[in-house]
């Protein structure tokens, strides 16, 4: 019986294929807001370049460590730690306030895949629960600002999970279990859709779910030994796969 489908976010629901900006420059714009806020309201800072360098070093170190222990980096914590390293007293900083000054948003060149609304609405009409599980290092309330701009927020009202909030990255089982618990689902009655063979496919399969790999043209795809249960290039292909796995799911009696 099919009761739920969980989706990765970036390059599964949101298309980053035409994002052409220099991420380093874009990140610096976000960080400038944080730096200016700290310097004006919390503690004198004179060198934004020092803050940017601390942030980038700490971000890189956190992601390198995460490859071993699957502990999710948290953008808010890194913003605070970078400021402390520049001489700001730690007890004066609030991570959420710094994240507000980071001013995350939907970025130019990124769009929701056009078939997403139709696919999600079909699932919901047939009483299939849906959720988002992303390896973002932004907390979900920050990504929610962005997905509201895409029109995704209304499609996923009940379950939106960020690794930053759970503390673990996919493929760690904890992040998958958090989503299952939130929607009151069991792994055997849930399918996962994502573009990463290692994080999404292998992680979901190890958690007991069927996994569908969304193949994205602009992404490299190593890990040829990982075998998804199905492959798609568009979510328009998903209903036919579900028909073969769960006959009758469209009428709610699979």
Image (cartoon, rainbow, N blue to C red):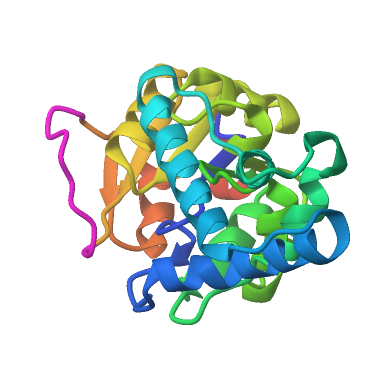
Q: Residue furthest left?
A: 224
Residue 148 in percent (x, y) is at 71, 69
Magenta-colored stretch includes residue 149: no
Q: Nearer the viewer, residue 86 or 64?
A: 86
Q: Quadrant of residue 164?
A: top right
Residue positioned 35% across, 59% down in the render: 237
Asked whether the viewer can see residue 226, the reply is yes
Locate the C terminus by quadrant.
Answer: top right
Residue 114 in percent (x, y) is at 47, 76
Number of on-image labels: 0
Nearer-the-camera pick, 227 or 230: 227
Name the residue: 16% across, 33% down: 223
Give the residues drawn in magenta, as a range: 217-226
**Residue at x-position 37% and y-position 74%:** 22
Q: If the image is split into quadrants, where does the N terminus sit?
A: top right
Classify 182 as above or below 159: above
Residue 188: percent from left, percent from top: 51, 21
Which residue reaches farthest bottom? 108
């Amino acid at each position: 019986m099919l009761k739920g489908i969980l989706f990765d976010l970036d390059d599964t629901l949101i298309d980053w294929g035409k994002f052409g900006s220099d991420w380093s420059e874009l990140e610096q714009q976000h960080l400038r807001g944080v730096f200016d806020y700290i310097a004006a309201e919390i503690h004198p800072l004179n060198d934004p370049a020092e803050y940017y360098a601390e942030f980038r070093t700490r971000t890189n170190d956190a992601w390198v460590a995460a490859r071993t222990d699957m502990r999710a980096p948290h953008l808010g914590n890194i913003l605070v730690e970078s400021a402390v390293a520049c001489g700001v007293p730690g007890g004066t900083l609030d991570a959420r306030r710094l994240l507000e000054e980071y001013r995350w948003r939907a970025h130019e060149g990124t769009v929701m895949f056009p078939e997403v609304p139709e696919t999600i609405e079909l699932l919901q009409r047939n009483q299939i629960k849906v959720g988002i599980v992303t390896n973002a290092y932004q907390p979900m309330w920050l990504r929610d600002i962005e997905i509201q701009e895409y029109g995704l927020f209304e499609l996923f009202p009940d379950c939106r999970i960020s690794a930053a909030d759970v503390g673990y990255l996919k493929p760690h089982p904890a992040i998958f279990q958090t989503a299952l618990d939130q929607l009151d689902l069991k792994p055997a009655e849930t399918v996962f859709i994502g573009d990463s063979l290692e994080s999404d496919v292998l992680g979901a399969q190890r958690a007991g779910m069927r996994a569908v790999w969304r193949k994205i043209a602009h992404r490299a795809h190593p890990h040829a030994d990982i075998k998804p249960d199905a492959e798609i290039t568009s979510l328009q292909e998903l209903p036919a796969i579900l028909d073969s796995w769960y006959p009758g799911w469209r009428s709610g009696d699979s």
